[in-house]
Amino acid sequence: MKLRSSALTDIGKIRQENEDRFLREDDLGLYGVADGIGGLPGGAEAASCAAGFIKAGFKARVENLSALTQAASAAVTELGDQINPSFGIGTTLTFGRFRDGRLDLAHVGDSRCYVLRDGRLTPLTEDHNVENEARHLRAQGKHVEVSAANRNALTRCIGQPGLPAVDLSEFPLRPGDRLFFTTDGITRMVEDKELEKLLARDDAPEAILRTIVDLGLERGGYDNLTAVLVFVDEVP
């Protein structure tokens, strides 16, 4: 499989620290993002721990992405017991392994992975937040009220007590696909329809990412902004 990739992170205009991390390991076929939970001490440490644990697992040729992700969560929980014992620490984690003509995807939290195929942008993940949880419960016939204040609150994260459920999926790849991993510092500033147009540009991955991040900054840069873009040029 022939891939081209780029990654970019920016602290934004408001935050005092960049609590985002990214995975871009071309030799491992590993790409993704982690977004340390704001409002708690240790967000940057949580994201770094999770991303580093996943990278180490890939180098050790761990095959079970669910077990690896849950082990990363346990490592973040243990770190939280040391640096913030009262409340712990947490992070999102969305990453993928490219191999054998497919993307194996693991996801916890509200960072995202999209695919641009034939000019159309499609999300491959669903945010683990109160609003989506309520939507699923309503589909089961349950009555659930959600306030505007907490609709985006996370319902799953890396570092939570116990082991988080991990969303796993396999996505068959085609030549021309573009995979986009991003934190919510971008998706809250740039609409999906805008991302669709920007990701379809006839530019190199790094130029496209620079344009997207700059747009988020122009609109306030209220959070850290991080993304990884992978072009699939050839598939075996």
Image (cartoon, grey):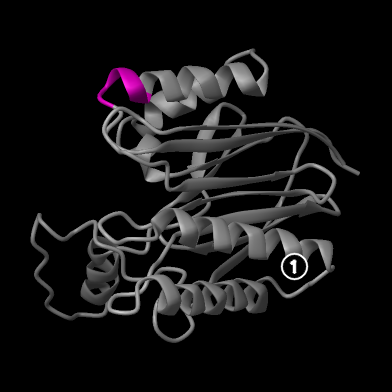
In the image, is 225 to the left or to the right of 175?
left
Residue 1 falls inside the magenta stretch: no
What's the magenta bit mostly, secondary-structure-wise? helix
Q: Position of residue 12 (x, y in %)?
A: 35, 30
Residue 219 falls inside the magenta stretch: yes
Task: Name the residue: 46% across, 23% down.
Answer: 212
In the image, is 100 to the left or to the right of 88?
right
Task: Name the residue: 25% across, 76% down.
Answer: 137
Residue 231 visible, this angle? yes
Image height of 60 relative to 188, above or below = below
Q: Quadrant of residue 17?
A: top left
Image quadrant in which the C terminus is located: top right
**Residue tagged 1:** 57
What span is in magenta? Answer: 216-220
Q: Residues within 10 Å of mark 1 (few under 14, many from 20)?
A: some
Task: Name the residue: 53% across, 62% down.
Answer: 107
Image quadrant in which the N terminus is located: top right
Q: Nearer the viewer, residue 191 or 161?
A: 161
- The amino acid at mark 1 is Gly
